[in-house]
Amino acid sequence: MSGQAGKLRVGVVFGGRSAEHPISCVSAGSALAALDPDRYEVVPVGITRDGGWVLPDPALRLAIVDGVLPEVTGGTAVTLVGDPAGRGLVRLDGAGPRIELDVVFPVLHGAYGEDGTIQGLLEMSGLPYVGSGVFASAASMDKEFTKKLLAAAGLPQGDHVVLRDAAGALSADPSLLDEAARERLGLPVFVKPSRAGSSIGISRVTDWAQFPEAVAAAAAVDPKVVVEAAVPGREIECGVLAGPGGGPPEASLPAEIRLRPGTDWYDFTAKYLADAAEFDVPAGLTLEQTRAVQAAACRAYLAMDCQGLARVDFFLGAGPDGAERLVINEVNTMPGFTPISMFPRMWAASGVDFAGLVDRLVEAALAPARPAVVPALDGGARA
């Protein structure tokens, strides 16, 4: 162990180059507070918006205060050692010894953090880290490929259309969708950047006249845009953790998001800046519904080849035939850890408090990898 008195030295990396920089900072604040100082020596590592790695000022407040979002703006410049023998950080000013790390907790959301990029960097550096590997992170970050992999596993999702090079296509054809596609999707639709989170760049379109502006807003975040048919129903979320000792994944009790009157949908403002939603943790579901959500969440986790943790988001409502239908919306490989985030709240309701949750994530990161077994549709299993 690299830390003092036999403690594990954990590098908590936060901030980053994505639009979700401030939410990463808030998540990191909660994670840092939950790491037991008797077990861990913590090294906070901030990444500025332009990609600089720093040991941030200890006075940096990792919380939203009076509506002001936190940001990593400076500190002691460091870099990650690429040689696996190095296992840590060096200061760019040459002062002080190398900072060895035992494990990294990349509390990063969005591009350059949740999309496989930092996971690849950590793999090359030989450092264990919390969360999914390169492939699962990249595939789960891209809504198009999440949908393809879930479909291959027989998991239900809503109707959608993918627009590649949406900004260029929009200039050539302002309508982008033909009448057949519009009729199939219906209204409203949600127009989303394919590779982004925290509802950044997402628009709810209730009139096709709004569509070009919505595509332009999404394409400003990611040139690939996904247009999704609205799925009527209750918004349900479920947390998944790697099973102890490399066993099968375990699902939390699900939770439900209910929007207050006057709030059309769960956008960035509703999530983080306004008191616009109510949360039922656990959700008011029947035992049968709860088990169905938990089973689908674990299947999605395995289908995406996730590791460590994930949050799977669902819609629960009636299908076209009137029968109850559970539809997967997204798989998040590094869900939020803010004070209002559903992932830690669901696990708290399931008997795992925040400190215990972080302990499990660190332990899973250090455990030897084992091949997952994905339940087959016929009731058997396949490696």
Image: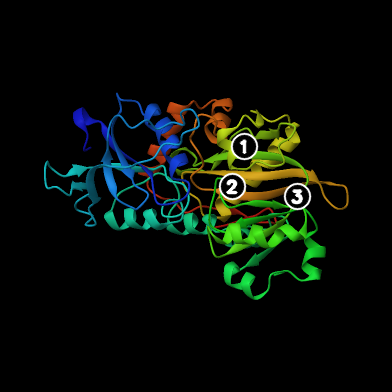
**Disc 3 residue type?**
Val
Give the residue number, with chain letter if any, for mark 2.
199
Q: Position of residue 257 (x, y in %)?
A: 67, 35
Asked if the residue at tag 1 contacts the one at tag 2, i.e. Cβ–Cβ closer than 8 Å, the answer is: yes
Residue 287 falls left or right of residue 269? right
Query: Which comes sooner in the sequence, label 2 or label 1?
Result: 2
| Image point (56%, 52%), residue name | 302
CA neighbours of label 1 inside 10 A, class few (<14), some (14 to 19), many (20+): some
Badge 1 marks a residue whose secondary structure is helix
Badge 3 marks a residue whose secondary structure is loop
| Image point (21%, 57%), residue name | 83
CA neighbours of label 3 inside 10 A, class few (<14), some (14 to 19), many (20+): many
Q: Position of residue 291 (x, y in %)?
A: 69, 38
Query: Which comes sooner in the sequence, label 1 or label 3?
Result: 3
Give the residue number, with chain letter if any, for mark 1.
270
Displayed quadrant of residue 70? top left
| Label 2, label 1: how far apart the Cα atoms are | 10 Å
Which-is-in-front pick, marks 2 and 3? 2
| Image point (49%, 56%), residue name | 136
Q: Position of residue 155 (x, y in %)?
A: 68, 54
Give the residue number, with chain letter if any, for mark 3.
231
Disc number for residue 359? none
